[in-house]
Image (cartoon, coloured by chain):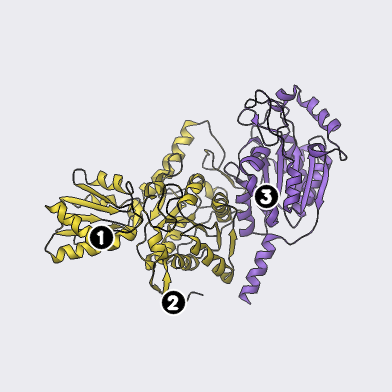
């Protein structure tokens, strides 16, 4: 039987948790571990890459696989090099919304466009949490943060929609309320040949909670009530893209074979 | 593939040949003058040896990708010029902090900023050592011929693998775009990476201060981070001891081994009273000027660091009889702080920042002026 203790012993490094009480990052770590377990993937075939931000700490140091904790915004580019150098590896990127779409937005677009076979889990809490709750590319219009004290003059990016338009093979969005769906999507992402992108709306009770005036339980209930498969825009959840198309490392291998004939 | 023999090629292509001969199997790059020819050559050559080439979305991605590939156990390289080299600085520091072997070629062009894309300069000398924030040391080589573009690229890979550092091949537009004879030798000395077979092995180092490197996919469950970390990779950003011992070792592993790394060429230094120190493209007319000065009976000497960082300080400090040192270079700052430090009171800077290399007669005239 898959118990919490089994998951913990098998996949999680025993270290003091750096996450705030009520943070969704622990749930996402749990979902990743369970997806790996369901797929029976050997841990030495998985490599985790992360950038800077709270969610970067989900795999580094907590997930018991090779982990590369990189500079701000660049994990997808590091992961692309790692995947191309060793296509046998399942390369998993865990990145926050700021890391992935702010400073690193360009890499996200181009990884989706080139359809490199990596899996990106983007943890979206709508703020820059590690640095103290500043406005993010995913913060809603008029929301107050420490750098938008009079309200956000800009608008939130619908990241999943952008990644779908850029050409990803798999795109899904869930929240930390939708744990079973999330685990299934991570499994799909890890087995997908091409570029897979899973957006997880997650609670940051410390900073996002302050904006919304909610604790983590209230936030989870808000996710349950507000995020629906038939909702519009950034509140829509579900699988948005699930297609097969030529993957980058396969294409590179084909070029090698063609040239060396 | 690149058979031993004679070639007539430009410097950029010779660097690509060197990379292939050194065993480079991954290149990620972004187009920029005057380094694009290296990128284009790697795109053509790599698949022929079973390697992989990616043109990335920018220089930030290029250097990130080669660091990622290096952790998969693949020798990796990128090539760029001034503006791109500036963009790469953060991750050069990351490679230093995580002790990742990579090779970065900077074919210098005149700056600052966009400057003169097709013109040579030597304004990146300090940046090549100090460009990323914080304390670290890396290795910087300076070729002055097409032959050295080939040889020093091989050497860059060897030094990167040996010391687990980012190595910069600091060329310039003149050497990169120049065509001359290249001799590819029969046998080439290649240093391969020392791999850690267990997690424990990857956490320990000997007298050379270089720990064996783990490889992703080998089941070691490595923890690699650019944050301050313990020898086992565990992030520890609060401990003064961990920060101090890590950063000190990163610097000391180069300082301690500098006798093995330092490299230079010298001529007429035995009895020289006036010494011309020069590197890269400028060293060619500098050597010519010193030969002409000797023909005129002037006791001139020639000294060329082949490795700029760590600088050949041991050798320079033994050049005692020198009365004056002239440093011609294509920069107002360049290497001058280092040379002035080595020869206080004797130092004469001779910069030229037109985008053109000094001529032999310009340097000869300067030697004669300084003797007066």
Around disc 3, counting alpha carbons within 10 Å, would you say few (fewer than 14), some (14 to 19), or many (20 or more)?
A: many
Mark 2 or 3: the one toward you: 3
Residue at 33% over, 52% down:
B353
Chain holding disc 1: B
Chain B rendered in what hue?
yellow
**Label 2 crowd bin: few (<14), some (14–19), many (20+), radius 10 Å:** few
In depth, the one of A3 and A102 nearer the eye is A102
Mark 2 or 1, closer to the camera: 1
Q: Mark 1 points at which residue?
A: B286
Up-down: is A12 above or below B260? Answer: above
B183 relative position to B266: left or right: right
Q: In this rendering, does residue B217 appear at all? A: no
Q: In this view, does A153 lie above or below B286?
A: above
The chain letter of the purple chain reads A
Q: Are marks 2 and 3 on the same chain?
A: no
Which residue in the structure is indicated by mark 2? B4
């Amino acid at each position: 039987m898959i118990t919490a203790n089994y998951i913990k012993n098998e996949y999680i490094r025993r270290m003091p948790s750096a996450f705030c009480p009520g943070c969704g990052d622990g749930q996402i770590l749990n979902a990743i571990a369970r997806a790996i377990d369901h797929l029976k993937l050997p841990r030495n075939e998985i490599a985790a890459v992360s950038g800077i931000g709270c969610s970067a700490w989900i795999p580094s140091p907590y997930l018991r696989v090779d982990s590369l904790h990189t500079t701000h915004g660049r994990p997808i580019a590091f992961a692309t090099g790692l995947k191309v150098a060793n296509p046998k590896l399942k390369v998993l990127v865990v990145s926050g919304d700021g890391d992935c779409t702010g400073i690193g937005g360009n890499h996200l677009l181009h990884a989706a466009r080139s359809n490199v076979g990596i899996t990106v889990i983007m943890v979206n809490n709508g703020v820059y949490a590690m640095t103290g709750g500043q406005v993010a590319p995913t913060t809603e219009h008029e929301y107050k943060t420490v750098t938008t004290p009079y309200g956000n003059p800009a608008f939130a990016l619908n990241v999943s929609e952008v990644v779908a338009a850029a050409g990803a093979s798999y795109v899904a969005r869930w929240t930390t309320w939708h744990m079973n769906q999330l685990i299934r999507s991570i499994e799909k992402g890890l087995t997908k040949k091409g570029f897979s992108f899973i957006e997880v709306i997650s609670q940051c009770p410390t900073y996002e909670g302050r904006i919304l005036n909610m604790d983590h339980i209230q936030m989870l209930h808000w996710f349950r009530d507000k995020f629906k498969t038939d909702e519009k825009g950034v509140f829509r959840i579900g699988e948005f893209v699930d297609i097969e198309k030529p993957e980058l490392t396969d294409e590179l291998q084909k070029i090698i074979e063609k040239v060396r004939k | 593939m690149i058979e031993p023999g004679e070639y007539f090629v430009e410097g950029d292509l010779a660097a690509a040949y060197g990379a292939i001969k050194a065993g480079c199997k991954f290149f990620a790059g972004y187009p920029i003058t005057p380094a694009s020819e290296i990128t284009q050559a790697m795109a053509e050559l790599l698949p022929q040896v079973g390697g992989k080439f990616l043109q990335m979305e920018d220089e930030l991605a290029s250097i990130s990708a080669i660091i990622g590939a290096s952790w998969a156990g693949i020798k990796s390289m990128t090539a760029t010029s001034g503006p791109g080299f500036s963009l790469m600085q953060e991750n050069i520091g990351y490679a230093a902090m995580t002790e990742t072997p990579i090779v970065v070629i900077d074919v210098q062009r005149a700056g600052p900023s966009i400057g003169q894309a097709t013109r040579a300069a030597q304004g990146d000398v300090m940046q090549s050592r100090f460009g990323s924030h914080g304390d670290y040391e890396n290795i910087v080589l300076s070729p002055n011929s097409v032959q050295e573009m080939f040889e020093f690229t091989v050497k860059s890979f060897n030094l990167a693998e040996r010391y687990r550092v980012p190595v910069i091949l600091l060329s310039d537009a003149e050497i990169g775009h120049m065509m001359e004879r290249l001799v590819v030798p029969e046998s080439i000395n290649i240093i391969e990476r020392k791999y850690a077979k267990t997690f424990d092995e990857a956490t320990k180092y000997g007298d050379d201060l270089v720990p064996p490197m783990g490889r992703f996919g080998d089941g070691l469950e490595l923890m690699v981070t650019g944050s301050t970390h313990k020898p086992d990779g565990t992030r520890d950003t609060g401990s003064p001891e961990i920060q101090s011992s890590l950063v000190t070792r990163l610097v000391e592993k180069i300082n301690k081994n500098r006798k093995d790394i330092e490299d230079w060429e010298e001529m007429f230094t035995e009895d020289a009273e006036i010494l011309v120190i020069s590197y890269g493209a400028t060293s060619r007319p500098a050597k010519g000027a010193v030969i002409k000065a000797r023909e005129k009976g002037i006791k001139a000497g020639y000294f060329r660091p082949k490795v700029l960082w760590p600088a050949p300080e041991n050798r320079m400090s033994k050049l005692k009889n020198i009365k004056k040192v002239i440093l011609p270079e294509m920069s107002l700052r360049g290497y001058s702080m280092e040379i002035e430090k080595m020869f206080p009171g004797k130092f004469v800077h001779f910069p030229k920042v037109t985008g053109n290399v000094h001529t032999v007669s310009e340097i000869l005239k300067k030697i004669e002026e300084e003797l007066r």
